[in-house]
Image (cartoon, rainbow, N blue to C red):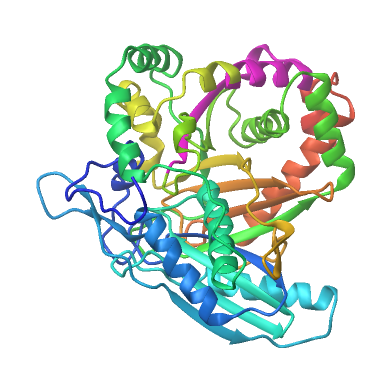
């Protein structure tokens, strides 16, 4: 289906959209609230033509109909409704210029934090907004926000790539060089057929046997949760080159991935917090198990429980081996989280517990859509080295979200997003420091007893 065509009214929801409905708190908060945002920021070298950029944003909305799609909740069953394309809001800002170099970098990240803490209402079309901040005619920052019901981290890379191609075309650099793709509505239709197949039936049995009556291991909150509107904050932290190099070396030597190494350390931290040895923890995957939709913008991300038994692990090497086996087994049987809940409903019980929060842990693993190469008359690089905390930022559906990004300069950039109604910032800052320490100590000697790793200061 081309971007100029429109999906039929009443298209079915994807299972991910159905999962989001579990956290529906109306149009003012929660997953359908104006601050449930996913976005990104990019530094731009070159003179930005504002009208060309505005036109490119319109072209983007025409191409990807999900950016103008809402979830109808006014009938017996929810449905996708595609609206006619409209031009997104593009704000323009003049940025205070502290001088070139690191000082400008800080202002760029402050601008990204401020715009990311804004709004993108699910009730206003289209579900994408942009802000352009200029230092001068040759140096600016572009921030693009989308509502999280129609986009995810992988999608943002497609969005910026396509936006730059449309911009270059409007600047006279030829037709956009973009791949063929399928619309998100087509994905939802395909998924219905996929879920009825034998492979998914087998996977459901796998999850029923491996998760069974287990529940997510919760993080005790500083305060009992109430019905108050969430106020989300983010703490960001740095894992230095030495530890990052050790993560990559351990992954190579032990036939694992950096995610597996980092997740094993996260499991160890969770054990230290809870005292539990049978731990079920959440990760977030891209959810793109059909390559036919790799070029599709939409909410594909999947919530996946990973269950690890530490009782048989004497060393970090053994814990990492167990984590590797868990990941490989569960990845091979990945199905939408809603399908897992259907056969193992107790896994989500902690979401209803007002004394704890469910944590999810991820490493960004998707292609970078703007990596500093010239496109037309601009050179665009993503702002990835984000180290500034923000007390009031974009919402997540619930719980606590850990995210790591292995930066090209050899460091890991970490973030923890949390509801400040439930936690003090100092609590999450302490957890980040404790996690980094455990990772450093564990990788210094992967054959040391776990008790030593846990007690070494």
Q: Position of residue 117 (x, y in %)?
A: 52, 70
Q: Position of residue 342 (x, y in %)?
A: 30, 25
Stretch of the chain drawn in magenta = 300-327
Q: Quadrant of the C terminus?
A: top right
Q: Is residue 316 magenta?
A: yes
Seen in the image, is 143 located left or right of residue 269? Answer: left
Q: Is residue 425 above or below residue 292?
A: below
Q: Position of residue 313 (x, y in %)?
A: 70, 15
Seen in the image, is 428 located left or right of residue 442? Answer: left
- Name the residue rendered at 32%, 39% in the picture: 186
Q: Position of residue 170 (x, y in %)?
A: 54, 71
- Name the residue rendered at 72%, 76% in the picture: 46
Q: Is residue 34 above or below residue 205?
A: below
Q: Is residue 426 above or below residue 89?
A: above
- Name the residue rendered at 43%, 22% in the picture: 214
Seen in the image, is 19 located left or right of residue 447? Answer: left
Picture quadrant where residue 345 is located: top left
Picture quadrant where residue 143 is located: bottom right
Q: Nearer the viewer, residue 296 or 443?
A: 296
Q: Nearer the viewer, residue 443 or 203?
A: 203
Picture quadrant where residue 274 is located: top right
Q: Quadrant of the N terminus?
A: top left
Q: How many marks?
A: 0
- Name the residue rendered at 61%, 68% in the picture: 390
Looking at this rendering, what residue extends furthest in the left direction? 76
């Amino acid at each position: 289906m081309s971007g100029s065509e429109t999906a039929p009214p009443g298209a079915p929801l994807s299972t991910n959209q159905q999962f989001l409905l579990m956290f529906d708190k109306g149009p003012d908060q929660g997953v359908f609230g104006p601050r449930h945002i996913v976005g990104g920021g990019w530094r731009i070298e070159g003179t930005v033509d504002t009208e060309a950029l505005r036109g490119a944003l319109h072209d983007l909305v025409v191409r990807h109909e999900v950016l103008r799609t809402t979830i109808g909740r006014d009938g017996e069953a929810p449905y996708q409704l595609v609206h006619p394309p409209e031009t997104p809001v593009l704000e323009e800002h003049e940025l205070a210029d502290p001088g070139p170099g690191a000082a400008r970098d800080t202002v760029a990240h402050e601008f990204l934090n401020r715009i990311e803490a804004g709004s993108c209402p699910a009730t206003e079309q289209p579900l994408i907004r942009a802000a352009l901040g200029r230092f001068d005619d040759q140096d600016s920052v572009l921030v693009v926000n989308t509502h999280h019901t129609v986009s995810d981290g992988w999608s943002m890379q497609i969005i910026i790539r396509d936006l730059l191609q449309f911009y270059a075309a409007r600047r006279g650099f030829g037709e956009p060089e973009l791949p063929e793709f399928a619309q998100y509505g087509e994905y939802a239709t395909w998924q219905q057929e996929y879920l009825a197949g034998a492979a998914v039936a087998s996977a459901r049995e796998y999850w029923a046997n491996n998760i069974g009556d287990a529940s997510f291991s919760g993080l005790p909150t500083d305060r009992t949760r109430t019905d108050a509107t969430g106020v989300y904050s983010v703490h960001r932290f740095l894992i230095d080159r030495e530890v990052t190099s050790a993560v990559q070396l351990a992954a190579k030597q032990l036939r694992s991935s950096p995610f597996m190494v980092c997740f094993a350390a996260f499991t160890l931290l969770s054990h230290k917090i809870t005292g539990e040895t049978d731990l079920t923890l959440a990760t977030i995957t891209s959810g793109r198990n059909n390559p036919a939709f790799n070029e599709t913008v939409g909410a594909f991300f999947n919530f996946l429980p990973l269950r690890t038994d530490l009782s048989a692990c004497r060393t970090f090497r053994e814990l990492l081996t167990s984590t590797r086996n868990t990941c490989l087994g569960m990845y091979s049987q990945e199905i939408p989280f809603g399908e897992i809940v259907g056969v193992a409903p107790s896994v989500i019980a902690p979401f209803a517990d007002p004394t704890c929060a469910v944590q999810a842990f991820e490493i960004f693993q998707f292609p970078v859509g703007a990596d500093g190469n010239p496109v037309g008359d601009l050179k665009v690089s993503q702002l990835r080295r984000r180290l500034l905390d923000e007390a009031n930022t974009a919402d997540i559906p619930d719980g606590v979200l850990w995210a790591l990004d292995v930066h090209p300069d050899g460091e890991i950039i970490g973030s923890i997003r949390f509801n400040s109604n439930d936690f003090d910032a100092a609590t999450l800052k302490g957890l980040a420091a404790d996690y980094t320490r455990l990772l450093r100590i564990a990788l210094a000697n992967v054959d040391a007893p776990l008790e030593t790793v846990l007690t070494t200061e």
